[in-house]
């Protein structure tokens, strides 16, 4: 039998998939743990150690496994317990042809959690986002999974509300997104920014062709209008610079094609004032690039989280409820949220982005970042408690 004081935690998630948000949550979780626990973490990543973010590859004692059924099945019996490290795994916003794959994805996490529970091991789901869960199968598999959890922390109040009838109150804690722990041990105040007369606007895009709230037509119309609005903004503000962030890289559901399309439109105005920041495997590098921006226009959820952590004025393009959940959690006015739908006109998007760049008070989050970091630590405190 494995020694409970030395056996490793298996840390599960969608890691090694070229997604800045996933790598930010994983990095935050590891950095938020006491160094003496690093040797007790086995991170399950797509291609094992080679697919970990470079910042984690440099941490002594960390171990990694490839994300295969065989590797996880072999590692589970001697493991100390299971950690599911954040993310929007249990939710419903997928079109019919994409939904079955997502259902299988949720089922895998539940199956591993169930087996760990049967083996008497602690099961921690940390920094989670839940909902919306309106389909019967999604609700069922989420409720089943929660039965096997020793404790669950959620990243915002809306997620707690989504599952509060499905788990005992004593097992549920409202925390914050694990990515906030990127600031653990770092200055919470933003890095020095460019001079005020050279403002930077960060932009993160996301295709919504496979979402219930989008589709091919909405995707094309909205982003064409957004490109036109940003080109007009760039043309009328000669000192403005635009930095396009590719938050999800790789070759599956990535942001590059859409980002490149926007880039081609904007360089027609002034190529010297536009740049693409490619997917960066180290999420701290992305965060530092955002810290150089005064404003962030975010569609990806973790572009919004990182923009908030970077101290940017923040505009959220809402394709999913989780963006408004984030806005409510960080005290961002709903006027800073723009719905991604076919009714948004070029003029509306232009006015919205102009107000963001101009520094309108609606685009300032009011939750202190130190408070967000302290709440995120509630998740890693549980790892310490159950170790």
Image (spheres, grey):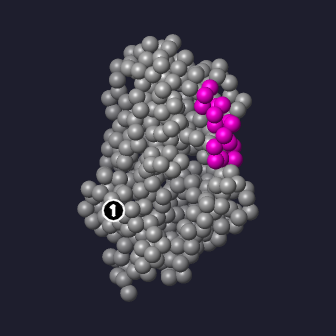
Q: Residues within 10 Å of mark 1 (few under 14, many from 20)?
A: many
Q: Position of residue 194 (x, y in %)?
A: 34, 23
Q: Nearer the viewer, residue 131 or 6?
A: 131
Q: Residue at x 65, y 61 (%)?
A: 100
In the picture shown, does residue 264 fall above or below 209? above
Q: Magenta part of the protein: which range?
A: 209-225
Q: Is residue 223 magenta?
A: yes
Q: Quadrant of the N terminus?
A: bottom left
Q: How many marks?
A: 1
Q: Position of residue 181 (x, y in %)?
A: 40, 50
Q: Position of residue 242 (x, y in %)?
A: 44, 25
Residue 113 occupies quadrant? bottom right
Q: Is residue 317 left or right of residue 264?
A: right
Q: Residue at x 37, y 73 (%)?
A: 8
Q: Residue at x 64, y 55 (%)?
A: 98
Q: Secondary structure at mark 1?
A: helix
State whether residue 92 appears in this view: no
Q: Nearer the viewer, residue 170 or 145?
A: 145
Q: Is residue 187 left or right of residue 125?
A: left
Residue 77 occupies quadrant? bottom left
State whether residue 259 appears in this view: yes
Q: Position of residue 381 (x, y in %)?
A: 42, 61
Q: Quadrant of the C terminus?
A: bottom left
Q: Is residue 350 magenta?
A: no
Q: Residue at x 40, y 66 (%)?
A: 66
Q: Is residue 28 left or right of residue 133?
A: left
Residue highlighted by disc 1: 49
In the picture shown, does residue 293 fall above or below 136? above
């Amino acid at each position: 039998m494995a020694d409970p004081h030395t056996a490793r935690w298996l840390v599960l998630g969608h890691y090694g998939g070229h997604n800045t948000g996933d790598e930010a949550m994983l990095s935050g979780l590891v950095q938020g743990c006491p160094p003496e626990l690093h040797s007790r973490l086995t991170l399950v990543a797509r291609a094992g150690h080679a697919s970990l973010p470079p910042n984690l590859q440099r941490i002594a004692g960390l171990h990694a496994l490839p994300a295969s059924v065989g590797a996880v099945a072999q590692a589970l019996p001697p493991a100390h317990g299971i950690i599911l490290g954040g993310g929007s795994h249990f939710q419903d916003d997928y079109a019919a042809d994409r939904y079955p794959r997502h259902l299988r994805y949720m089922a895998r996490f539940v199956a591993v959690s169930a087996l760990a529970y049967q083996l008497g091991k602690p099961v921690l789901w940390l920094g989670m986002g839940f909902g919306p869960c309106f389909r019967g199968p999604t609700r069922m598999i989420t409720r089943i999974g929660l039965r096997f959890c020793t404790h669950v922390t959620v990243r915002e109040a809306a997620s707690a509300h989504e599952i509060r009838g499905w788990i005992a109150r004593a097992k549920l804690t409202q925390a914050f997104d694990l990515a906030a722990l990127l600031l653990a041990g770092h200055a919470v105040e933003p890095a020095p920014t460019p001079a005020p007369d050279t403002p930077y606007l960060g932009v993160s895009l996301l295709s919504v062709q496979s979402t219930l709230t989008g589709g091919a037509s909405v995707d094309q119309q909205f982003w064409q209008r957004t490109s036109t609005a940003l080109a007009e903004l760039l043309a009328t503000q000669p000192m403005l610079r635009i930095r396009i962030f590719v938050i999800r890289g790789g070759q599956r559901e990535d942001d590059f094609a859409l980002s490149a399309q926007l880039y081609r439109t904007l360089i027609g105005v002034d190529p010297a004032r536009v740049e693409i920041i490619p997917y960066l495997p180290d999420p701290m590098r992305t965060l530092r690039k955002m810290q150089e921006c005064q404003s962030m226009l975010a569609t990806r959820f973790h572009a919004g989280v990182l923009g908030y952590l970077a101290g940017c004025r923040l505009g959220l393009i809402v394709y999913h409820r989780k963006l408004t959940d984030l806005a409510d959690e960080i005290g961002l006015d709903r006027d800073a949220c723009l719905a991604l739908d076919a009714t948004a006109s070029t003029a509306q998007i232009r006015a919205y982005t102009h107000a963001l760049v101009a520094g309108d008070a609606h685009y300032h989050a009011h939750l202190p970042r130190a408070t967000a970091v302290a709440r995120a630590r509630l998740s890693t405190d549980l790892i310490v408690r159950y170790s």
